[in-house]
Amino acid sequence: MEITERQRQILCQIIEEYAETASPVGSVTMAKLFNVSSATVRAEMARLEALGLIAQPHTSAGRVPTDAGYRFYVNHLDGVTEDSALERGTHAIEVRVSSQSQADAAIRRAVDSLVELTGNLGLATIGGQLYLSGISQLFTQPEFVDTRRVQAVAKLLDNLEPWLREAAPGEPLNIFIGQENPIGRNSEVSLIISTFRSPFSDRSYIGVLGPTRQNYSRVMSLVKYTGKMLEEVL
């Protein structure tokens, strides 16, 4: 998919702004950020919309990212996010996990830490069991005022463990965005998981499930770090 550098920057800004505000992003906001006219931004947005990367939920509203837009963004992230908040987060996970002498307790502590740091639901496989944490925290997100979306997420969670066994994601970091999830396609959530070797399995999983609207760069970095760290510690 070919887009210009300015279109790429506008798409990234819409995604990051929407992650913070949960509100559609308008052309006036983008025009101020890029120091161009609103008409120029509207033309660029129209191109991004034609490509299916953003959508206009209401006639008079701004734009929101689509699943395809998020996928483009994730695929073009430049390396690992490095900032003070991320550094504090990874340090907190390391301290909490390393204080546990039992492998199952260490994995649970890592999941609970991811919940606190991301606001998402955390999950991990421990032997033949799936450990979940932070369901109530997930459903406080503004996306889930719609009960239909809550039901779709519940369906996904009910089938998550067998799906993980069947899908067997093979990369150190795996991201399933929105309709890429084979179950709960209409729940508009993203599953970000990391594989790691543990005393229970050569292919254990840890990760988070949250709305498609999230800070992918930071969350992906935290999940990938946690998987790698658990493999080293355990």
Image (cartoon, rainbow, N blue to C red):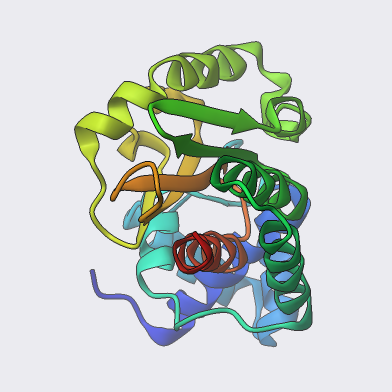
Measured as percent of width and height from the top left, residue 50 is found at: 34, 55
Most distant residue in the front direction: 101
Residue 182, compared with residue 62, is above or below; it is above
Measured as percent of width and height from the top left, residue 207 is found at: 51, 47
Measured as percent of width and height from the top left, residue 67 is found at: 41, 46
Q: Residue at x 36, y 55 (%)?
A: 197
Q: Residue at x 73, y 73 (%)?
A: 91
* Residue 180 relative to residue 144: left or right: left
Q: Residue at x 39, y 52 (%)?
A: 175
* Image quarter (top left, top right, bottom left or bottom right) of the N terminus: bottom left
Q: Nearer the viewer, residue 204 or 150?
A: 204
Q: Is residue 49 visible?
A: no
Q: For residue 27, what is the image quadrant? A: bottom right
How many marks can you see? 0
Q: Is residue 233 visible?
A: yes
Measured as percent of width and height from the top left, residue 111 is found at: 63, 45
Q: Residue at x 34, y 62 (%)?
A: 172
Q: Nearer the viewer, residue 182 or 89?
A: 89
Q: Nearer the viewer, residue 234 or 148?
A: 234
Residue 115, compared with residue 130, is above or below; it is below
